[in-house]
């Protein structure tokens, strides 16, 4: 269960390949906590009169061309106030951006992304003229008028297409099929232990099925979409556990469990992550729930035994430690009592000799 990836057996027509090169691609949370823009020392590259870029991490391969569909994560702040108004990492939902067909308020961001390679992360500076303009935006996201922006952007990968067919223009079957192919590509990379690249493919698969898309589905289409989307989250969790990024793994399992509260793999992988974080009671609860829904799974039984042995060893260690403490106190008490008897004896002898001496002086007088 712990290393078994989800599979989908449906076959689909071939689609344009995703460009996602290089094993050094960074996935997931940046090193900073994300509350403020990162401090970047690299030289600023001027891309436009109102757009510049500072590279945080180099990417690999080619850059996207016009009408490419780019998959990315970003955080966005207003430059002057440092107010963060959007964070796709926090939402665990990458977005897609079709270059040349972006919304007006994302024109500056699109210029930055068009200069980036797969796996590249950069801090993009955008003037208000190529962002939310004179009026700003008072709904979501909340951006004041004439606000210059900062974007911390990571390009996960991009789809090279000739006409730039947006996901919103694809049929339900096309989107689910494209996502399924990305998932299968991710599974192949996982088997080769290329975990970062595998997560890259899973992230792009999830991007085909954003919340707006999922809310429109019902019946068999919803089931088909979840049969691809949820396994991608679980496979990302498996990668993150291997990379010792346990909190992030728990987050992806939680997403699945909001849709399928009885999913044994989600419970199992969340339990593994919690056990690694030392949350033994909560991990045991997850393993027991997983066993309830998959009673014959050997991996779940193995983890429960390992957890029991670990707790037994910890109990034994604590017992030995406390035993040593009490033994030390007993030995210390015995030594203290011995010293007290010597003091009493010495005081009694001094008192005895003092009385004898006084009697001798009285007789002499």
Image (cartoon, rainbow, N blue to C red):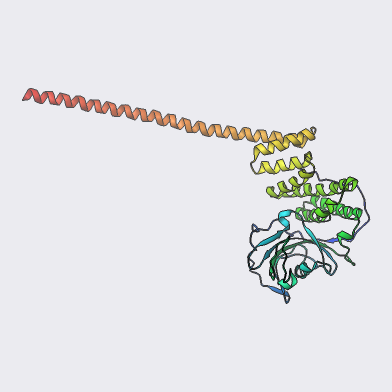
Query: Going 82% across and 54% down the picture, which residue do you hit?
Result: 212
Q: Is residue 21 visible?
A: no
Direction from residue 278 to residue 242 in the image, left or right: right
Q: Position of residue 61 (x, y in %)?
A: 79, 66
299 to 42, vertically: above or below: above
Q: Position of residue 181 (x, y in %)?
A: 87, 53
Q: Position of residue 252 (x, y in %)?
A: 74, 48
Q: Quadrant of the C terminus?
A: top left
148 to 177, vertically: above or below: below
Q: Quadrant of residue 363?
A: top left
Marker count (numbered): 0
Q: Quadrant of the N terminus?
A: top right
Q: Residue furthest bottom?
A: 49
Q: Quadrant of residue 282?
A: top right
Query: Going 76% across and 50% down the picture, which residue do you hit?
Result: 236
Q: Is residue 254 visible?
A: yes
Q: Residue furthest left?
A: 365
361 to 287, vertically: above or below: above
Direction from residue 87 to residue 180 in the image, left or right: right
Q: Residue furthest right?
A: 13
């Amino acid at each position: 269960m712990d290393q078994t990836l989800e599979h989908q057996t449906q076959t689909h027509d071939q689609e344009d390949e995703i460009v996602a090169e290089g094993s050094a691609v960074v996935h997931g949370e940046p090193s900073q906590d994300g509350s403020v823009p990162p401090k970047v020392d690299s030289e600023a590259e001027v891309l436009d009169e109102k757009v510049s870029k500072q590279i945080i991490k180099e990417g690999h391969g080619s850059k996207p061309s016009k009408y490419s569909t780019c998959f990315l994560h970003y955080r966005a702040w207003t430059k002057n106030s440092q107010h963060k108004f959007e964070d796709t990492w926090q939402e665990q939902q990458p977005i897609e951006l079709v270059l040349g067909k972006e919304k007006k308020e994302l024109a500056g961001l699109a210029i930055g992304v068009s200069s980036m390679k797969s796996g590249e992360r950069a801090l993009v500076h955008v003037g208000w003229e190529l962002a939310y303009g004179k009026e700003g935006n008072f709904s979501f996201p909340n951006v004041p008028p004439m606000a210059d922006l900062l974007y911390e952007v990571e390009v996960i990968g991009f789809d090279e297409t000739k006409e730039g067919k947006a996901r919103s223009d694809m049929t339900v079957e096309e989107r689910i099929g494209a996502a399924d192919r990305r998932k299968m590509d991710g599974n192949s990379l996982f088997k080769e232990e290329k975990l970062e690249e595998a997560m890259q493919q899973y992230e792009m698969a999830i991007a085909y099925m954003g919340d707006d898309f999922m809310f429109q589905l019902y019946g068999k289409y919803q089931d088909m979409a979840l049969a691809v989307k949820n396994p991608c989250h679980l496979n990302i969790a498996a990668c993150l556990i291997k990379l010792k990024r346990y909190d992030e793994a728990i987050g992806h399992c939680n997403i699945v469990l909001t849709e399928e509260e009885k999913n044994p793999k989600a419970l199992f992988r969340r339990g593994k992550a919690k056990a690694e974080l030392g949350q033994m009671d909560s991990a045991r609860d997850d393993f027991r729930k997983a066993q309830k829904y998959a009673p014959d799974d050997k991996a779940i039984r193995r983890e429960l035994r390992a957890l029991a042995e670990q707790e037994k060893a910890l109990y034994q260690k604590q017992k030995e430690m406390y035993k040593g403490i009490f033994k030390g106190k007993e030995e210390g008490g015995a030594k203290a009592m011995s010293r007290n008897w010597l003091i009493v004896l010495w005081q009694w002898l001094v008192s005895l000799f003092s009385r004898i001496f006084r009697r001798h002086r009285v007789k002499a007088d």
